[in-house]
Amino acid sequence: MNKCILAIVVVLFLGGIQSSVAKAQGMKEGKWSMTVESKMEGMTPEYTQAMKQMENMPPEVKAMMQKNGVSMSANGQGVAMTYTQCLTKQNPVPKGKDSAKYNCQETHEMNGDTVSFHMSCHNGDMSMEGEGHMTYSGDTMEGETKMKRISNGKEATITMHTNGQYLGACS
């Protein structure tokens, strides 16, 4: 009887490990199109002015951004940006194009189809720190990131909601 119970426990345990590994494999490596909607609490007047300028961005600037795979819009409350990026199991967290410029460091942990991460960035008088999660489900992903930003002694909180669509293999 004890051997039977032990065998069942071992089978369930190994099945759980395989199931966990299979779920971690659910993140598809390849090119993803992602839309990130950012909202900032504690906006400075400069940030508010910059958002107003983005609303009136010249068509040639928009075209240049789209050529590089980025489109942006502002609504007075925040910014929406769409871009494409190749993601891998080793690097499953989308990164902004300026991550290197701001010396961003990230740690992440995959649990099933969800990757949780912590990020910190520093450059001169600006620093940001935060955490978030992304959940992959077949050809889609969704997640949220909360960051605290300090720039020139002023603090703001940024909440980013990300939706993504798998496009195919990276080229």
Image (spheres, rainbow, N blue to C red):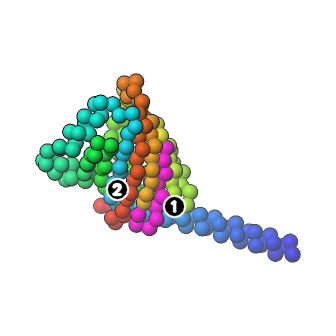
Type of the residue with mark 1: Asp
Q: In the image, is 35 to the left or to the right of 4?
A: left
Q: Which mark is residue 113?
A: 1
Q: Residue furthest right?
A: 1
Type of the residue with mark 2: Met
In the rendered image, the quadrant that contains the N terminus is: bottom right
| Residue neighbourhood size for the residue with mark 1, other residues' Cα within 10 Å, grouped as few (<14), some (14–19), many (≥20) | many
Q: Looking at the image, is mark 2 or mark 1 earlier in the sequence?
A: 2
In the rendered view, tell whether residue 97 sits above or below residue 162: above
Asked where in the image residue 41 lies, by quadrant, the reply is top left
Q: In the image, is 14 to the left or to the right of 72?
A: right
Q: Does the image show residue 99?
A: yes
Location of residue 96 in the rendering, given as x and y in whole percent from the top left corner: 35, 45
In the rendered image, the quadrant that contains the C terminus is: bottom left
Asked where in the image residue 149 lies, by quadrant, the reply is top left
In the rendered view, tell whether residue 163 sits above or below residue 129: below
Q: Which residues are magenta?
A: 131-140
Q: Residue at x 45, y 46 (%)?
A: 145
Residue 136 lies in the magenta-colored region: yes
Which structural element holds mark 2?
Answer: strand
Q: In the image, is 46 to the left or to the right of 6?
A: left
Asked where in the image residue 39 lies, by quadrant, the reply is top left
Q: Which mark is residue 104?
A: none
Location of residue 80 in the rendering, given as x and y in whole percent from the top left corner: 31, 49
Q: Residue at x 57, y 64 (%)?
A: 21
List the residue tagged with mark 2: 34
CA distance for labels 2 and 1: 17 Å
Q: Residue at x 38, y 57 (%)?
A: 163
Location of residue 162 in the rendering, given as x and y in whole percent from the top left corner: 39, 53
